[in-house]
Image (spheres, coloured by chain):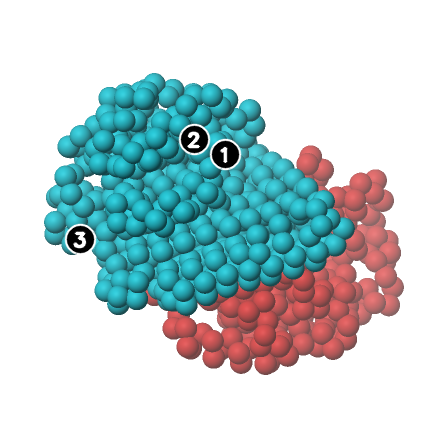
Amino acid sequence: MKIKIKDLHAEINGLKILKGVNLEMESGAVHALMGPNGSGKSTLSNVIFGHPAYDVTGGEILVDGEDILEMGTDERAMLGLFLAFQYPVEIPGVTVGRFLKRAADLHAGEGETKTTGFVKILREMMDYLEIDQQFINRYLNTGFSGGEKKRMEILQMLILKPTFAILDETDSGLDIDALKIVSKGVNKLRGGDFGALIITHYQRILNHIRPDHVHIMYQGRIVTSGGNELVDQLEAKGYDFIKKEFGIEEENDVESVANG
Amino acid sequence: MSNPLPTVEIEDYKFGFHYPDASVFKTRKGLDDEVVRAISQHKNEPEWMTDFRLRSLAEFRKKPMPNWGADLSDIDFDEIYYYAKPSENQSKTWDDVPESIKETFDRIGIPEAERKFLAGVGAQYDSEMVYHSIQKELSDQGVIFSDPETAVREHPEIVKKYFGTVIPYTDNKFAALNSAVWSGGSFVYIPPGVKVDIPLQAYFRINSENFGQFERTLIIADEGSFVHYVEGCTAPIYATDSLHSAVVEIIALKGARVRYSTVQNWSSDVYNLVTKRAVAYDNATVEWVDGNIGSKRTMKYPSIWLMGEGAHGEVLSIAFAGKGQEQDTGGKAVHAADNTSSVITSKSISKDGGIATYRGHVKVEEGVKNARSHVVCDALIIDPESGTNTYPYMDILSDDVTIEHEAKVSRISEDQLFYLMSRGMSESEAAMMIVNGFLEPLVKQLPMEYAVELNRLIELEMEGSVG
């Protein structure tokens, strides 16, 4: 899968957040998107999935050459895209098992997945991610701790086997053990035709999932791309170095308020 | 950027069909002593019942319309037919039921349900039960399941003892109306210690236009017995309104348990104004499961009077208010004895401008010790046009009580839809999943068949409608 984002502009409630994002990604590689709070990272992932709160005011998102901006969120998912949410949403009354079975059926295309086969895979994946089997009967994300919610996102990813996954600050708020488990999940799918975009504020998760490409976002644009050395530079010098390096003027800080 | 709305066709109400009116006898439009006498005469009733009807009619005339609840100002009592007899006789086999009536029930699926999972079935068409049957082993045990007319003839001693004692004809305007013109319904008597493990069902169908259906149900569960009674109902869609006003009385004697489940699916032109009340004696349990999906306006608050020590009552109310609908529902528990407990759970969904109102009343009488009551009402609003109200009345005259009340109003959020859609679900499927999840804790308490039926109805209501 080839994802090509061209001069993408987007806003929420009239606030301009994305101001000309250009980014190319391909499955088979892991990309990291780094940037300070308010730089537009989460907005980018929401816009790729068509969150109704955002207005796209310019540019395109091409998936294998096709513009997806007119597609519904569900259609985008069916292309093989997956979003691991920064804040997974609670769905009371809908069990994890029922929800995952339905989502797996949708992704299996014609004909449902066999329940027995599905349950077997589900149990294996839950063991792999060290999720208690009782979660199958719990209501989706309802009353889960932050770490449990994030693991549930990774479980969904392993079950749905996307071609390209975006992980939106999946590392935030995780302790080191949980972080390792989340990383294990991503690394399991790695290789072959799977690609991912790891959105993060910190380099910590990137010690466990080594990215092939690193992109730095600042004030609604990708300001530079490179390899792992960018991560080390950021770690050593902080985000200020980006500003100096690229001669970025400080804008008003309204964006950090709008960042979600 | 917003997602395009799903282009799902809204499926019509499935049961809106009707057959030509082929009543063998019908009273003229409107209501007076003569009409009431005609009904009574047609049923060959004893004088005490005729007198009861006439007293009730006088009471109906005297009582004002309720000045609270749903808007009933459009009901024109002079434009209604109060009695229509669909066939000469009641049948014991479906083959004997007149063809168009049998076809109607086939389309609704009653004979099939009877074969699959029912112990007895009554089917009412306009004013009369056209079919009634009960498994032989139950009647051998002394279980009575008939229409109330038959009971008046064959078991006058039981009828006289209980009829109108739980809901007197003076109770409210519509109870008075029902008492005057009642026709059809069920009479159930379960002897001491007999447990009817599979449900008895009554199905109510209106076929005529401008019609009033006034069935009357009386259930007596003798000491230590158990019965699950289920009712369903549908009607054709006409340009004018019909009225359904039933009275249901339940008596659960010492240690008995009665569960009464309703899946109400009247068409959108039926006023559904029903009085349902049970009395529970020592250690008896009464459960009302009340699903209201259809009708134009419904006012219905199943009640339980906990008269004996250790009695327990539960009301599970599920209401769906769609376009043009007002569901004014809830429950009522009166604690009149020590160590009694009640649970009232209400879940409502409103969409397309529908209004769902919870109206509940918990009363604990003076001097009652150790009464416990738990009330939960949750409302889910699908779109900004729709509304919900909550009126939880408490009337606590004793100190020795534990009362809990929780109420919550939620809306389907953009973020919930977005989350589910990001996993591949269409917008309407995502909304449906959220609604199902909202109802789940309640629906899982229903027997399988009714849970499936309820889910199916709500799915139909939800189709193509997402805000």
- Residue beneath label 3, please? B92
Q: Amino acid at mark 3?
A: Lys
Residue B238: x %, y % from top left: 29, 28
> Pointer 3 indicates a residue of which chain?
B
Q: Residue visible at 56% across and 37% down?
A: B357
Element under disc 2: helix
Earlier sequence position, callout 2 versus callout 1? 1
Q: Residues within 10 Å of mark 1 (few under 14, many from 20)?
A: some
Q: Nearer the viewer, residue B135 or A187?
A: B135
Q: Which mark is residue B176?
A: 2
Q: Colour of chain A?
A: red
Residue nearest the observer in this picture, B205 or B169: B169
SS state under label 1: loop
Whether residue B67 is visible to the viewer of this picture, yes or no, is yes
Q: Residue at x 50, y 63 (%)?
A: B255
Image quarter (top left, top right, bottom left or bottom right) of the N terminus of chain B: top right
| x, y percent for residue B242 | 34, 29
Closer to the camera, A41 or A109? A109
Chain coloured cyan in this rendering? B
Residue picked out by circle 1: B171
